[in-house]
Amino acid sequence: MEFSELLNIGLMQGFAGLSLFAVLLLMGLGLAIIFGQMGVINMAHGEFMTIGAYTIYLGSHLSSHYAPSLVSIYFPFAIVLAFLFAFALGWLVEWGLIRHLYKRPLDTLLATWGISLAMQQSFRTFIGPKEVSPTLPDWLLGSWAPKEGLDIPINGLFVLALTAVVTCGVLLALNRSRWGLRVRATVSNRVMANAIGIDTRKTDRLTFAIGCGIAGMAGAAFTTIGSTGPTSGQLYIVDSFLVVTFGGAASLLGTVVSAFGIAQTQSITEFFLHGSMAKVLTLSLIVLILMIRPQGLFASKVRR
Amino acid sequence: MSNTDFTLAVEDLTVSFDGFKAIDAFNLYIDRNELRVIIGPNGAGKTTLLDLICGRTKASAGSIKFNNTELTRMAEYKRVRLGIGRKFQTPSIYENLTVFQNLEVSYPKGRTVMGALAFKCDDEVKARVQVVAEDIFLADRLDLEAGLLSHGQKQWLEIGMLLMQSPELLLLDEPIAGMSARERDLTAELLQRICKNRAVIVIEHDMEFVKRIAHKVTVMHQGKMLAEGPMEKVQADPKVIDVYLGH
Amino acid sequence: MKAIQELIKRYQLASLLVLTLLLAVVLPLSLDIFRLNLIGKYLTYAFVAVGLVMVWGYGGVLSLGQGVFFGLGGYAMAMFLKLEASDPVTTAIQSTPGIPDFMDWNQITALPAFWLPFKSLPLTLIAVIAVPTLLAWIISFAMFKRRVGGVYFAIITQAVALIVTVLIIGQQGYTGGVNGMTDLKTLLGWDTRTNSAKYILYYLCVALLVGSIVLCRWIQTSKAGTLLLAMRDKEDRVRFSGYDVADFRIFTFCLAAALSGIGGALFSLQVGFMSPSFVGIVPSVEMVIFAAVGGRMSLVGAVYGTLLVNAGKTYFSESFPDLWLFLMAALFIGVTMAFPMGLAGLWESHVVPWWSKRKNKGKGGDAEPAGTDAAPPAAVAATAKPARQASADSALTKGLSDVGAQSAIPGSI
């Protein structure tokens, strides 16, 4: 009895970690594409997530005010919209800014920080400084109780499924599609890729926009675990960067593993420690490991 | 591995990148006063070999001994301080500094942080810069910004930066790339001069040039040694002909 | 006479003198003590910006965690001042008199052991420099010895900034939490809130800042400075010339941390409080923009950059709070896109040539200048600063692209 109770708590805490895992993984995937593949540091990545979260809120708000019948089904559509909004904005940012800075990664970092500030202030001015939460459809709210004393929230499962689909989609797209081939060619040799007729500029723009779009979907996942405010994204930016570097910048598999590891460590330590100390412990652990193994978990040796 | 009286003794050296062996159980012995040229088709592992000796790449197995000191686990800068100098394939000089400053920075004094803070460019340094600059035919270019030199002069300058350190082993990766015919002649003469009292390894593709400078030639192919000996002997070796013409 | 001229050029004494005159004479004469105190506060950030010029401009390594070092220095000083402010008599109403008020509120009944050294001023002054330097050494030793640089270093330092902030806020009982340490009034019984004290502290701040700039300039002109630039642009060449590249980077990073610590301590003294809002990611990145606006290669420029951005911040966030963040955003984007060398770069590329052209015209268009001071504009621009720095500017993009080479690790998925 004692033991099974402990097991149940462990399982539930583990599932709580899974929602965080989903957000971190989606954030990390977007970053891994942008940072790992293109070498661009996007400090505004968190704000793209916030855009996604606000899109879900917008969907919830509009449907509950104007079309109550749609309340139960707006969520999936809003997720697609979240992707599209973030994608479009990412496209714009790449066109207006990033493409001029490919040779100066540290400057990209500062410029995208500027973008992030501007976006935060736009949220504050045009949407409002208060935190908002969408009303989630009923079917997302309950919990699934396979046995007594074990409650697994359905929204967690949903988010997990969404993450799995997106992750597989990204992996497939990178490894099987024409776009993926172009991206990989551009990454390994930009000049050559250009010479064999790949439009590297277009590839870059598409890649950046897709990365941002995935961050938008992370925002959709985020609405199930927290409320959205102008600075919500900023809270996740460091974690997401650590996910990517910890996994090994060029390895998407590494991103998955490290997102899982970080989310679970944080969730489990949170059970034993005060929330902020859990965060300190998790982050310090990652930083320490990165100091010992800076190339991350998965990295390949490359002949120079 | 036993001690030898070679300046450089490479034994059973192996390095693999994700399973691909760029250098495979390679042996090489270089004497003092010797000028060895390494040739071989692209991808044979020539540059990787120099990288291993100077520490830019870490060996997977085997030993590299410099005057009987094992190098394989030593940090790069320590190998340099022991007396190994490396010139890279594309000239690697400080383009924004003057020729004088390039040579001055390479002077083996003030190598620690505190040493560099206290470093003074005294007469001894100036005299040494002058001597080396004359060696590398740049004595009248000392105040010129190095980025303005011709490609061949940049190659010389990098060799000069190595000479500032009076190394016992010089590793030169394609020193005459981009040089005019006259510059090649001067370089051949320079190489003959500087291999006195030290060992020099040169990687080169130009066979005419190799013939002029080499004491001995080592042919590499797919990370292994294919042939070794005087140029005429190596050129007549059917295996070598096969590698160069067969592909 | 010529030797003195050489010295002035080499150490950029002219621009330093102008800055000193501005800070020590013009501003105190033209501003009231309230505003001068504000300038003094900005100047404490300038210590961080000057450090960033060394680490980022010269070293090519961007740290997004300089606020941590500023905070550590600031907290060290604040702890001493807080202990002095919490003597048993003034805190008699607490359940445990003699400890800082926030400890009492958090049911702590005895002074924690790590607070004890801060009862002594000499130990505190040592800690102001030693604690940030030690942390900087640990971070930079681990990273630079393993050749981690570029964007990875930026990410790790940013994570450190987050960790330290969360830690400070979370450990309320030991640190004062999100409010920080407030009500710092006296230093060894000397009231730091009087006008005369504010003047003295302001001048102390100016003197230390000018001293720091001279120190950094001296390093820049030594062989170590040449090597820093050299390793920023051609890291491998420096390494294979027998130098331990990591040691030089560690030294520079520790130097910047120590300077930031001094800045932080002066902040606590002048402003009278210290809080986590000067430690985290946001202030750390803002400090980078101070240096960027002034010019990442210019020590003196970093001070002007800090003053301008902060003056702008104070003005706009008071008058148009909504506009300020947009302006700040524009600053980040504009500086990186249009003026990567900041104000100092604009000065070199526009003001100096214009000035020398005017000067030449004034001489009646002499064909061949007789003295050195009427040389053609290009030559003046080139000699106005030592060759090293002049050329460093042109190498900026190239240098940065080398730094970035580390970020683009090709590999399989």
Image (cartoon, grey):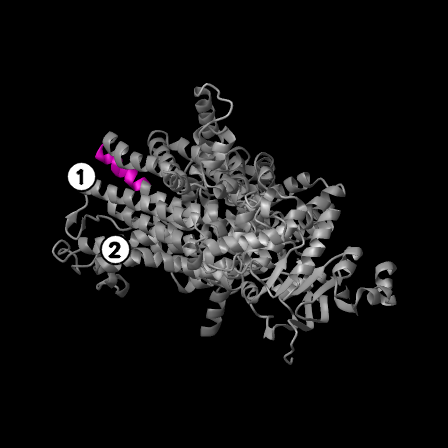
Residue B54, image x, y percentages:
61, 64
User: Decide: marks 1, 2 in contact (CB < 8 A)?
Assistant: no
Task: In this rendered view, identify the residue nearer to me: A248 or C298.
Answer: C298
Which residue range is magenta in the image?
Answer: C32-42
Residue A167 lies, in percent from the top left, at 63, 53
How packed is label 1: few (under 14 Cα within 10 Å), some, or many (20 or more)?
few
Q: How many marks?
A: 2
Q: Secondary structure at mark 1?
A: helix
Can the viewer see residue A122 in this picture?
Answer: no
Name the one closer to the observer, A94 or A261: A94
* Vertical position of residue C13 compared to residue A142: above or below: above
According to the picture, the residue beneath numbered tag 1 turns out to be: C195
Q: Residue at x 60, y 61 (%)?
A: B85
* Callout 2: SS: helix
Q: Which mark is residue A118?
A: none
Q: In which quadrant will I find the C terminus of chain C?
A: bottom right
The kind of residue tagged 2 is Met
Residue annotated with mark 2: C79
**Residue placed most toward the observer, B80 or C343:** B80
